[in-house]
Image (cartoon, grey):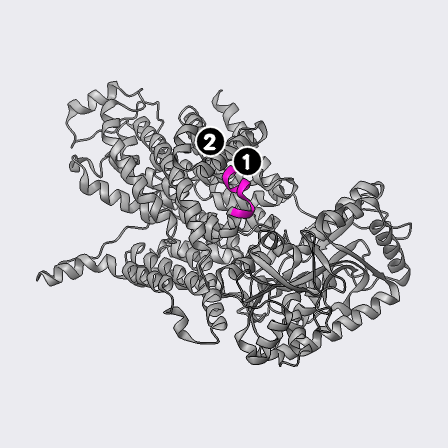
């Protein structure tokens, strides 16, 4: 190869690298009056890649690509951090009035809004639909002296601070469950010991090392350890029992604690869209979640379908917001 | 090989053979080759390192159906980057990576004396030998360490971070004060963001985007790419003559007064050979010693490849039979540090895979890559993702062979890369860094933060503050804080949690030893009644 050719080859390679670097999500405008979607939809996952919201956004993207691609398909981009409140404030400030900018969110975001004292809240956006739920489990290391929920409740009542709970981020679904559990059995939530981790995976390590007594997380985070016999389930927080390895897991209610809490996820649109636009987006999302590809995604990720829209959704979000606000302040967070 | 492995441990052999089975598919082989080539390219270019490259490629790998391919690619980039730095050091005297600084000392002198080929060859073969030893050690050490790591609690992780800080501040910097200032700057940057345990924002100055903390990529790109480019550009203006690139096939032989003329003529005649018998005879011991030094230092959270490379250089200087050649192109001074450099890479993977603790910027990015695929490195990884782990390890063996095959024959290509005019190169690095960070975050705030850190990195280089402790502070500062607080929360505020288990006490002892060890010669000298005892230091010129 001659000198010049080589220089061009190297220059070309660097240019390609630069192009790769600039390839990033962008939006365009136009075509808002016809049927929805009239152009490509952008879905924000307000978290780093890999978590539940990201997976939900990408499952929506793949469903739209498989079955509704004629109108331009969908992009997914990530705005991670602060329990999703960074993404929320970006949606509010940058996407006002654009029905093609959607964002995945869920119960964790409600907790983060309260815990981080976020200046924007879910009231500032337009809820479209809830999509899925995930059951939460309370699990212990296989050798733990806690045999069932009764043992756990007894231990909590004896000395609330001595039971070390471990789960995901502070103020997230996992800690909300601990707070509500304490309150339901008559223990002051602020006195519970909760050790926050960056996610369920990190919590698993802590549980197995014995530095945490009770792990709290989505069932999928613990599933392989439970199947391997390294962890035991005390209860699931879902309204109905779940099976792992053919064994039914008791719900909290069946164990005598009147408490239900599931980690729901949903999708919202920016503020400033008209009622008509909201109805169109809602109708589209309903078609998406009724499709076969979405069904397959539910199975693949072990999600329970949980679709609420319209006034029913507004009421639900309202209740959940109030509920979260109470638990967060009971736990002494966000002060 | 299978027979040999079976004698040792059938489960390990089966795992590793499965791993090789997965790697030796066309797709994965291609990824490994792409990884090492790209890694060598960015390693050769001063200022762009494997950390930035992996960070930039991270979004692309979302589309991989199987994370294994992504990790094969990343491991290739990491290993290639480690190797590529040596070429720049030897031919240009501008280390591409901080870990290649030690190589530049003797390597460039060798090149100036017409022995560039021998220097490149001893670096390449030494990297291969030591890299392979490192991977073999990784193969055998990883699983036992992972089993031990299951017992690690927050207080133990806290102690690991303490060990890292103790060894870095005392070993890396010529002045402990400078080392500590750098480290605390890093810890300060690491504190920015929403506190993990309480959800409260800290040091964010009301800027929302800082709530997520300062991404390690931004710190690494700012300090290494931007800081380095500004620093080199500033030096460029002074018009030093050291920038001359030496063509390994050319006739450039610098006149030398000190070495016997006859030896020189002898070497000149052998110029076209990569490594003479004499060179090989003088190289193999430094290779092995380098591997012995590099692996444990990479495995200990002591801050990447800088410390072991300088330690290896100092060792070779002490043990050589040709002390008169040191400073004028002693082959031992290239063979040892390069071997240490590559062995430390395999060492770095031990804490990364088994504990989830990154000990270098690149390892921190690889940790982020695991999290992208919803995998948590740590003891559980070996149970849950056994396939991935062993395929990754097998890919390292393959990548090492590919590096050896790729690099010496392709040396002319890398020389061409170096011929890019300096001003264009540095401008290109700045553009690349800016675009890269913007594409990762989609936010100008982060780009600004990167430039602020870059300018800080420029002044740190200018005024001789070590840069490596900053990165370590950013990575391990939060680990230390969060784990320390977790330990305390779990113990309901009882400080004795740090002294109650033998494992924790053992780690604390190691930290104290790491702090005291460099002062031992001074203390011993003092005890013997002499006053001139000096502290052991290893230069840091990155």
Q: Is residue B388 magenta?
A: yes
Which secondary structure dominates the residues rendered in magenta?
helix
Q: Chain of mark 1?
A: A
Above or below, comparing residue A281 to residue A121 in the picture: above
Q: Which residues are magenta?
A: B383-391
Which residue occupies 22% across, 39% down?
B327
Q: Is residue B261 magenta?
A: no
Give residue B206's quadrant in the image.
bottom right
Above or below, comparing residue B124 to residue B169 in the picture: above
Q: Position of residue B404 (x, y in %)?
A: 41, 28
Which residue occupies 91% across, 49% down?
A35
Q: Position of residue B428 (x, y in %)?
A: 52, 41
Give residue A309's quadrant in the image.
bottom right
Q: Quadrant of the C terminus of chain A?
A: bottom right
Closer to the observer: label 1 or label 2? 2
Q: Nearer the viewer, residue A43 or B420?
A: A43
Location of mark 1 (residue): A14
Q: Is residue B473 visible?
A: yes
Within-10-Å neighbours for mark 1: few <14, some 14–19, many 20+: some
Q: Is residue B85 visible?
A: no
């Amino acid at each position: 190869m001659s000198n010049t050719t080589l220089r061009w080859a190297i220059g070309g390679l660097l240019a390609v690298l630069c192009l790769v670097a600039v390839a990033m999500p962008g939006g365009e405008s136009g075509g808002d009056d016809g049927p929805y979607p009239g152009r490509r939809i952008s879905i924000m996952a307000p978290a780093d890649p890999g978590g539940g919201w990201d997976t939900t956004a990408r499952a929506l993207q793949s469903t739209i690509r498989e079955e509704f691609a004629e109108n331009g398909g969908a992009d997914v981009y990530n705005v991670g951090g602060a329990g999703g409140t960074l993404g929320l404030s970006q949606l509010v400030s940058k996407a006002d009035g654009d029905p093609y900018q959607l964002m995945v969110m869920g119960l964790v975001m409600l907790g983060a809004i309260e815990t981080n004292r976020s200046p924007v809240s879910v009231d500032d956006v337009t809820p479209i639909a809830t999509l899925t739920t995930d059951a939460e489990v309370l699990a212990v290391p296989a050798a733990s002296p806690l045999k069932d929920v009764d043992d756990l409740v007894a231990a909590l009542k004896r000395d609330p601070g001595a039971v070390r709970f471990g789960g995901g981020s502070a103020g997230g679904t996992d800690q909300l469950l601990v707070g509500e559990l304490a309150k339901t059995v008559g223990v002051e939530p602020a006195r519970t010991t909760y050790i926050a981790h960056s996610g369920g995976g990190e919590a698993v390590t802590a549980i197995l090392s014995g530095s945490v007594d009770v792990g709290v997380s989505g069932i999928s985070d613990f599933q392989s350890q439970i199947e391997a016999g390294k962890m035991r389930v005390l209860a699931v927080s879902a309204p109905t029992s779940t099976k792992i390895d053919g064994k039914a897991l008791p719900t909290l209610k069946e164990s005598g604690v009147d408490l239900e809490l599931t980690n729901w996820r949903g999708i919202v649109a920016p503020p400033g869209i008209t009622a008509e636009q909201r109805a169109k987006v809602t109708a589209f999302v309903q078609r998406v979640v009724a499709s076969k590809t979405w069904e397959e995604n539910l199975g693949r990720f072990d999600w329970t379908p949980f679709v609420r829209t319209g006034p029913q959704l507004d009421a639900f979000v309202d209740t959940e917001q109030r509920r979260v606000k109470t638990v967060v302040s009971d736990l002494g967070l966000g002060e | 090989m299978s027979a040999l492995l079976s004698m040792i441990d059938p489960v390990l052999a089966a795992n590793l053979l499965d791993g090789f089975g997965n790697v030796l598919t066309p797709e994965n082989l291609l990824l490994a080759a792409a990884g090492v080539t790209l890694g060598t390219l960015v390693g050769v270019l001063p200022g762009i390192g494997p950390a930035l490259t992996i960070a930039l490629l991270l979004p692309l790998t979302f589309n991989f159906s199987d994370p294994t391919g992504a990790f094969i690619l990343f491991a290739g980039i990491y290993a290639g980057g480690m190797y590529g730095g040596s070429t720049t050091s030897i031919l240009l005297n501008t280390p591409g990576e901080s870990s290649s600084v030690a190589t530049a000392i003797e390597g460039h002198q060798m090149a100036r004396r017409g022995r560039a080929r021998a220097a490149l060859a001893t670096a390449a073969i030494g990297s291969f030998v030591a890299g392979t030893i490192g991977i073999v050690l990784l193969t055998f050490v990883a699983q036992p360490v992972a089993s031990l790591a299951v017992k690690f609690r927050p207080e133990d992780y806290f102690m690991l971070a303490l060990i890292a800080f103790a060894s870095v501040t005392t070993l890396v910097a010529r002045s402990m004060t400078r080392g500590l200032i750098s480290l605390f700057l890093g810890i300060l940057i690491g504190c920015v963001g929403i506190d993990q345990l309480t959800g409260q924002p800290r040091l964010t100055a009301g800027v929302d985007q800082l709530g997520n903390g300062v991404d390690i990529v931004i710190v690494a790109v700012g300090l290494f790419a931007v800081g380095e480019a500004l620093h080199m550009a500033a030096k460029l203006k002074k018009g030093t003559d050291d920038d001359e690139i030496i063509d390994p096939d050319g006739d450039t032989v610098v006149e030398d007064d000190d070495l016997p003329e006859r030896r020189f003529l002898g070497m000149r005649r052998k110029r076209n050979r990569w490594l003479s018998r004499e060179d090989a005879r003088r190289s193999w011991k430094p290779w092995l010693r380098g591997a012995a030094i590099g692996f444990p230092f990479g495995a200990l959270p002591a801050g990447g490849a800088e410390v072991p490379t300088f330690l290896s250089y100092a060792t070779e200087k002490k043990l050589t039979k040709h002390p008169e050649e040191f400073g004028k192109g002693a082959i031992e001074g290239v063979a040892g540090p390069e071997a240490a450099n590559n062995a430390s890479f395999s060492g770095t993977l031990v804490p990364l895979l088994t504990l989830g603790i990154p000990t270098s910027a690149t390892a921190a990015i690889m940790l982020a890559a695991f999290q992208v695929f919803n995998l948590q490195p740590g003891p559980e990884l070996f149970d849950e993702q056994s396939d991935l782990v062993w395929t990754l390890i097998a890919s390292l063996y393959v990548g090492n062979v590919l590096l050896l095959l790729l690099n010496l024959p392709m040396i002319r290509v890398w020389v061409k890369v170096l011929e890019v005019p300096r001003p264009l190169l540095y401008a290109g690095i700045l553009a690349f860094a800016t675009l890269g960070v913007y594409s990762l975050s989609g936010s100008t705030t982060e780009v600004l933060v990167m430039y602020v850190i870059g300018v800080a990195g420029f002044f740190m280089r200018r005024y001789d503050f070590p840069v490596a402790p900053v990165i370590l502070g950013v990575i391990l500062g939060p680990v230390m804080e969060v784990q320390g607080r977790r330990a305390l929360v779990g113990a309901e505020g009882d400080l004795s949690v740090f002294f109650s288990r033998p494992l924790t006490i053992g780690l604390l002892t190691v930290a104290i030893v790491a702090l005291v060890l460099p002062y031992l010669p001074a203390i011993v000298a003092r005890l013997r009644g002499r006053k001139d005892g000096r502290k052991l230091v290893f230069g840091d010129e990155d």
